[in-house]
């Protein structure tokens, strides 16, 4: 059966002398595709079969086996990501994360979130913030959403003093027992970023303190509750004001 599928290459392996096997994340599943001759520079499949290529793949589809690539249209090769080591490392990290979450829950919105994140990083938005927004949103898919609308202990919506990954959410003045205090802006931003439509972001004006507090909360939260361990490390470029 011939099929046209839209997706992003999430991994690639060499196969025989000149071919490649790629895995493509689509809205509905992850498809393994053999791209004959794709390792050759002259091959029409050379471009478009590397990791982080968003393409339309024409394939001879096999449900439980290896599909075969017959034609390819590149929609976006995320050129700006490929030029920047820090952007590459964030994108590699989210690719691995998204693949793991997708294997946990095959939900169509995961593909959309992934694509929106790559687009935003490619457009020049702060890759750390985009990665954190994606990680916040994936918590729902993982079934471990933090309590961010009221105090996790008593339900109080007012007098919130901090957020605690240990407790799993916001903490009010009455329930506060000496947890680390974060800036009120961090709490406000965490909620905003959780609910924001990633594709519609046009401006990210966040102070370094708030960014790092958000990042620390999410790192700690994932470590405690997600059970996900990734091989990729994020290489953070220092001295960059973005
Ligand atoms: Zn409380």
Image (spheres, rainbow, N blue to C red):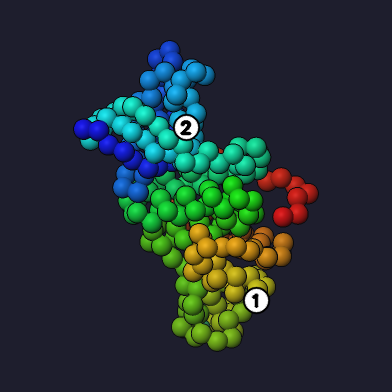
Secondary structure at numbered mark 2? loop
Residue depicted at 31% across the width and 47% down the height: 28
Contact between labelled residues 2 and 1, with CB atoms less than 8 Å apart: no
Looking at this view, name the residue that lies furthest to the top.
Answer: 17
Query: Which residue is the site of mark 1?
Result: 184
Q: Is residue 168 left or right of residue 71?
A: right
Residue depicted at 34% across the width and 54% down the height: 107
Residue depicted at 50% across the width and 59% down the height: 199
Q: Is residue 181 left or right of residue 38?
A: right
Instruction: Work out whether residue 234 or residue 195 is closer to the camera in this orientation and state it.
Output: 195
Secondary structure at numbered mark 1? helix
Q: Is mark 1 within 8 Å of ligand 1?
A: no
Query: Which residue is the site of mark 2?
Result: 48
Whether residue 167 is visible, yes or no, is no
Picture coordinates of residue 113, whole percent (x, y): 45, 55
Picture coordinates of residue 7, whole percent (x, y): 40, 42
Residue 179 against residue 39 in the figure, above or below: below
The residues bearing labels 1 and 2 have C-alpha atoms spaced at a distance of 44 Å
Q: Is residue 137 left or right of residue 130?
A: left
Q: Is residue 242 left or right of residue 189?
A: right
Whether residue 69 is visible, yes or no, is yes
Residue count near mark 1 (Cα–Cα under 10 Å), binned few <14, some 14–19, many ≥20: some
User: Which quarter of the rendered picture does the N terminus lie within?
Assistant: top left
Picture coordinates of residue 14, whole percent (x, y): 44, 21
Residue depicted at 27% across the width and 36% down the height: 3
Looking at this view, name the residue that lies furthest to the right.
Answer: 239
Residue 63 against residue 117 in the figure, above or below: above
Residue 5 against residue 41 in the figure, above or below: below
Q: Which circle's residue, 1 or 2, is located before the other in the chain?
A: 2
Q: Nearer the viewer, mark 1 or mark 2?
A: 2
Q: Give the number of marks.
A: 2
């Amino acid at each position: 059966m011939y099929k046209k599928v839209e997706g992003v290459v999430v991994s690639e392996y060499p196969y025989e002398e000149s071919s490649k096997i790629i895995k493509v994340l689509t809205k509905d599943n992850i498809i393994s595709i053999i791209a004959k001759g794709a390792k050759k520079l002259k091959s029409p499949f050379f471009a478009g079969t590397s990791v982080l290529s968003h393409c339309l793949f024409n394939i001879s589809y096999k449900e439980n086996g290896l599909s075969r690539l017959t034609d390819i249209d590149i929609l976006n090769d995320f050129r700006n990501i490929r030029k920047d080591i820090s952007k590459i490392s964030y994108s590699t990290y989210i690719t691995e994360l998204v693949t793991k979450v997708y294997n946990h829950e095959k939900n169509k919105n995961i593909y959309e979130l992934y694509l929106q994140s790559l687009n935003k990083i490619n457009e020049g938005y702060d890759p750390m913030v985009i990665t954190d927004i994606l990680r916040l949103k994936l918590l729902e898919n993982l079934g471990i959403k933090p309590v961010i609308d009221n105090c996790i202990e008593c339900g109080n919506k007012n007098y919130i003093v901090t957020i605690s990954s240990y407790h799993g959410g916001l903490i009010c003045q009455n329930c506060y027992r000496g947890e680390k205090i974060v800036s009120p802006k961090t709490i406000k931003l965490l909620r905003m970023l959780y609910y924001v439509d990633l594709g519609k972001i046009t401006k990210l004006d966040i102070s370094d303190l708030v960014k790092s507090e958000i990042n620390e909360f999410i790192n700690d939260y994932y470590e405690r509750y997600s059970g996900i361990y990734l091989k990729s490390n994020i290489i953070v470029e220092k001295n960059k004001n973005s």
